[in-house]
Amino acid sequence: MAQGSVQVTHTGSVRTGRWRRRTGEYGSLAAALEAAGDGDVLSLAPGTYRENVVLERAVTLRGPGGAVGSVRIAPADGVALTVRASAVVEGLHVEGEDAAVPAVLVESGRPELTGLRVVTRSAAGIEVRGDARPTVRRCAVDNPAGTGVTFADGSGGALENCEVLAAGRSGIAVRGGSSAHLSQCRIHHAGGAGLLLTGEGSTVEAVGCEVYEIKGAGVQLTSRASGELTDCTVHRTSGDGISLDTEAVVKLTDCEVHDVPENAVDLRSRAQARLARVTVRRFGRNGLSVWDAGTRAEAAQCEVHDSTGDYPAVWVSDGAAASFTSCRVHDVPDALVVLDRGSSVEATDTDLAQIRGTAVSVSDGATVALEQCRIRDAATGAWFRDHGSGGTVRDTTVDSVASGIIVTKGADPAVEGCTITSPTEAGVFVSAAGRGSFTGCRVTGSLGYGFHVIDGCRSALTRCRTERCARGGYEFADAGPSAPEGSGGGPVVEDCTSDESAEMASARPTVPAARTEPEPDGLLGAFAPQQAGAAGAVRPAAEAQPAARPAREVLAELDALVGLENVKREVRALTDMIEVGRRRRQAGLKAASVRRHLVFTGSPGTGKTTVARMYGEILSSLGVLERGHLVEVSRVDLVGEHIGSTAIRTQQAFERAHGGVLFIDEAYALAPEDSGRDFGREAIDTLVKLMEDHRESVVVIAAGYTTEMERFLAVNPGVASRFSRTITFGDYTAEELLRIVTQQAEEHEYRLGDGTDEALLKYFTVIPKGAGFGNGRTARQTFEAMVERHAGRVAQLPDPTTDELTLLYPDDIPVLP
């Protein structure tokens, strides 16, 4: 389309002392703009204008009515349209091809941009800077190479009924203390965040907007930015729905977040969020996750439901806090998980229902305060898991669960005025040094016991009542090895009643019930009485171990292995670091902290398990590990078949490895490429936490193919940070495989006859080395096959000589597969 003419309609204002012409026609935009003054209207004829248009006066630049795109501003390079005044721009098609600059740049004034279509491959479709405050209405931006719309350098403005059709980076970015008001806008098909706010003072107010088909987070706020979203929808993202970091603040009202594979709403690093009447559904990880001390979320009249993954609906950890008022959480694996000292959750008048696992889980010193809440249809109502974990549960009902309230491993909640109805296992279950006070509580219709306290746990029961409990209202088993010292061997009971008897004695029961069998199946099965370790972790008693070999002896054995020169150097470097650190501490000097967890990558049969076993021995001889033994596990040992069992299996494997090395073979199988509802991620998440909590007592080595292990390390942000280094085990050369066979022969008192070594070298050179090739294992299998063929040959001799009994010949080599 050729360039058209520009008609200028003048306002009739006085200029240089004379009345100007009321109309004029010009052959270029530059000429028309030179002649125009404030208030003039420039009407563009259809055509393509290959000019860099700069508006420095308050004019109106208008395309003709009719087909979209009939007027195109399309220079070869540079900014297509620059606005530096309170101008009006209407009905233009703007194209930019310069990746270093925006297609439309608004630098000052309060211009109005209406009905623009910006199709470009620029740094930004529209960029607003400095003191500019534009109003942008009914505009569309298509910029697959950069940002859709950018507000920067303290600028501001409003977008009304606008659409970002595509963006290579963020859809709309607000940074550098800028502010934006978005009304009825749509942002989709962005390669970064849909809406990004970053920097102190950067703010956004969005009303009635939709963000979808985003490859990053739907809405992301960071570095003290703030936002208020009302009646907005975020869905179909590849990352989190809404993400806050580094003291960012957001208020969400009447919003909806759904169909996101990661966290629906994620807060970290002292971020703050207030949610009112927000609905979160169909999320892959957490519906709401809150991390780090100083981070806080407040939710009122919100709903979280229909998880598509196997993670808790609400996750609060690392000292964060959250509060819920009149909210609903339902149809999820676990409803509320709060962990780590300093973390806390308050919930009032809140429903937790249709929970496949635990409704409320409290661990690692965290606390909750539940009041007038309702829990129903869950495997466990509330589980206080370990020492320091507790809080209060008041006037709350728990209905149709396997277990109402579980207290274990030193946890000590205060439960008051609660009613537990129709549990299938126990209304209240306390074990493994758990405590807890229960005042004015009632258990009715239990298929098991009402209150079941074992291991001599010193819980306090006051004015409690049980009714229609199939196995009995109260069961207090003998004190076990995990009973707290000086506890006296049981709960303190006062003014408690049951429909089985008039009233229980006001004191600790003196006749304990005989109960030595394991706990019921399901979640309770993990707490059969066992020996408690010093740190509170349940683990088997240590087996008698032979004295550890000196490190130099184990290193000498490592050096004797065929090949693996890179591996030997890495292990010796680690050993030297640990030994020097030990000596520096003995000398009263500071010693560098050495992370001992390792990743072994390489093909099967390259010695990964053998080296792991030696590594454990070395650490034991240096006093780093108590025993140095190796516990080898794979996916089948860690991943359970139902909610909750994976974490238990993983912890049990960790406990077996206490004082030694946990070797995870084919660790990448925990993170399959198409994970779906796979429980492997739960095992990884559990491992990450255990590796940190017990880094002084267990060393973890994850092993597998090189490429697949890269995926494993990327599945969780904490995984890669837990491992100090990756050691690659290369494939054996043909010469090294020959040396392995030679060593095997010498060990078993065989010899290689004339020409056998050359034949073996050729055999190992041409043998197929596909996915099934076993490296050192193949060499050993080759030797075993040679011995078998030798036996078949020599057995036919009537009186074989010593040479005939020991020599292996080329004919004994098996046929190539």
Image (tube, grey):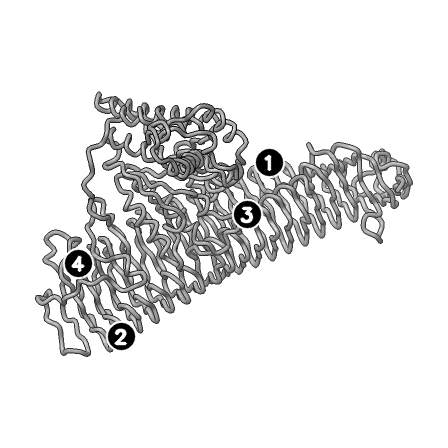
Q: What residue type is labelled 3?
A: Ala
Q: Tag 3, which secondary structure?
A: loop
Q: State the residue at coordinates (21%, 46%).
A: 533
Mark 1 lies on residue: 153
Residue at the spot x=56%, y=46% of the render?
216
Mark 2 sits on what residue?
444
Q: Position of residue 542 (x, y in %)?
A: 20, 44
Q: Earlier in the sequence, mark 4 or mark 2?
A: 2
Describe the element under mark 1 as helix, strand or loop.
loop
Gap in angstroms between the C-alphas marked 1 and 4: 65 Å
Q: What element carries label 4?
A: loop
Circle 1: is it few (<14), some (14-19), or many (20+) Cα within 10 Å?
Answer: some
Q: Which of marks 3 and 2 is nearer the N terminus?
A: 3
Question: Could you tell me which secondary element the residue under label 2 belongs to?
Answer: strand
How many neighbours does mark 3 have within 10 angstroms: few (below 14), some (14-19), or many (20 or more)? many
Residue type pointed to by label 4: Asp
Res 815 seen here: yes
Upstream in sequence: badge 1 or badge 4? 1
Q: Is there a contact, CB below 8 Å, between mark 3 and mark 4?
A: no
Residue where numbered disc 3 is placed: 217
Determine the CA span between mark 3 and mark 4.
48 Å
Observer able to see residue 777: no
From the image, state whether disc 3 or disc 2 is nearer to you.
2
Query: Is tag 3's residue or tag 4's residue first in the polypeptide sequence?
Result: 3
Q: Is residue 633 above or below residue 252?
A: above
Q: Nearer the viewer, residue 19 or 149?
A: 149
Q: Is residue 391 above or below residue 472?
A: above
Question: Where residue 579 sits: x, y (%)?
Answer: 28, 24
The residue depicted at 23 percent of the width and 70 percent of the height is 449
Q: Name the residue under label 4.
A: 455
Q: What residue type is labelled 2?
A: Thr
Q: Earlier in the sequence, mark 2 or mark 1?
A: 1
